Image (tube, rainbow, N blue to C red):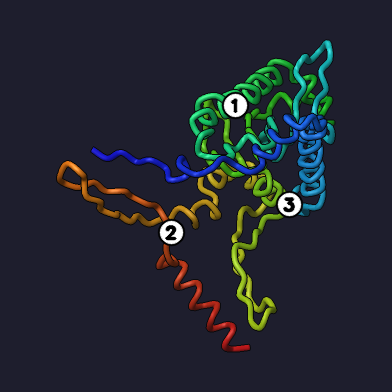
Amino acid sequence: GSLLIPQAIFNISDPVYRVEAWLERGGIDDTALERRGDRFEAKCRAGLVAAMGGNKTFKDAHIATHGISMSKSFPHQTDLLFQIGNRAFVGEIKCWLTPADAHHWDRFYRIRLPEAVEQAVVRADALRANREVLAMVLGIPRVQADALEICPIAVLNQSAGFSLVSRGCRIVDADFLRSYLRSPEMMSGVAMHYGKPVAQQVVSLYKNEQAASDSFDRIMANPWPLRRFRDRLERSDTTYPRPTGGSFKIETLFRGNLTPEEKVQHASLMDLIQGQ
């Protein structure tokens, strides 16, 4: 069998965590660092509000500008709620949930990511049982709220876990989500000539609001930035002798050259440049 050990395990820990530890040991107040989650949540939500507001494809989409505050009628503070087409998305926004170094990967997938999923699922279940709150917060008729499919999502500001689904909750990247809601098209590449862009590669995501709703899971499950990285991964083996005889191998993953599809796209862009 094979034993794969990430090389980063043998490296020093993440510098951000070391700086925070130095601040605490030196007696410097790091309260501001503890509040970064609230600040990111507000910034992320404001960005999504602006994105949906500027998307001319959306004709009847809604978003809760300030999320949902806890109340007697709804005891769950909710970070994100928006509706496109016939679906409402209930989001749990997390800042720096991503493991900072290799030592944190197990805890991330075993504890922290499931906790974020649990929070999103609980709030989605609560809104399914309380459609009046859903209608009130989104500013839509109760009959429309009753017909919405409610979908939990976990929104991260770093991409570990992006595209995964757990308990029906999709893990999405905050920047990609904002781009998705901002426009039905997304730029996936650009050709430069003497420092100036001369050609762009554009990905068409959807054609109308309902298509944006219907395509959400498919696109978030296999987003082109992740696909481009994944398809370029290659493996390399290095063989070492054993002191007791025989040998063992260390396998390394690295990002390889362009895929055949990307080479065709690259050639097309070069043709455009040469025609300038």
Q: Give the quadrant of residue 233.
A: bottom left
Where disc 1 sits, the SS reads helix
Q: CA distance from mark 2 to mark 3?
A: 28 Å
Q: Earlier in the sequence, mark 2 or mark 3?
A: 3
Q: Earlier in the sequence, mark 3 or mark 1?
A: 1
Q: Amino acid at mark 1?
A: Val
Residue denoted by label 1: 117
Q: Amino acid at mark 3?
A: Arg
Task: Identify the disc placed on residue 182.
Answer: 3
Instruction: Specify the quadrant that holds the C terminus.
Output: bottom right
Horizontal side, residue 27 vs residue 258: left or right? right
Q: Amino acid at mark 2?
A: Arg
- Provide residue 160's location: percent of width, then percent of height: 56, 41
Tell me if residue 126 comes above or below residue 93 in the rendering. Answer: above
- Provide residue 10's location: percent of width, then percent of height: 45, 42
Horizontal side, residue 210 vs residue 74: left or right? left
Taking the spot 40% from the left edge, 52% from the top edge, the residue there is 253
Q: CA distance from mark 3 to mark 1?
A: 25 Å
Tags 3 and 1 touching, CB below 8 Å: no
Residue denoted by label 2: 232
Label 1: few (<14), some or many (≥20) within 10 Å? many
| Eye-nearest disc, 2 or 3 | 2
Where disc 2 sits, the SS reads helix
Near-viewer residue (71 or 59): 71
Q: Earlier in the sequence, mark 1 or mark 2?
A: 1
Taking the spot 66% from the left edge, 37% from the top edge, the residue there is 96
Label 2: few (<14), some or many (≥20) within 10 Å? some
Label 3: few (<14), some or many (≥20) within 10 Å? many
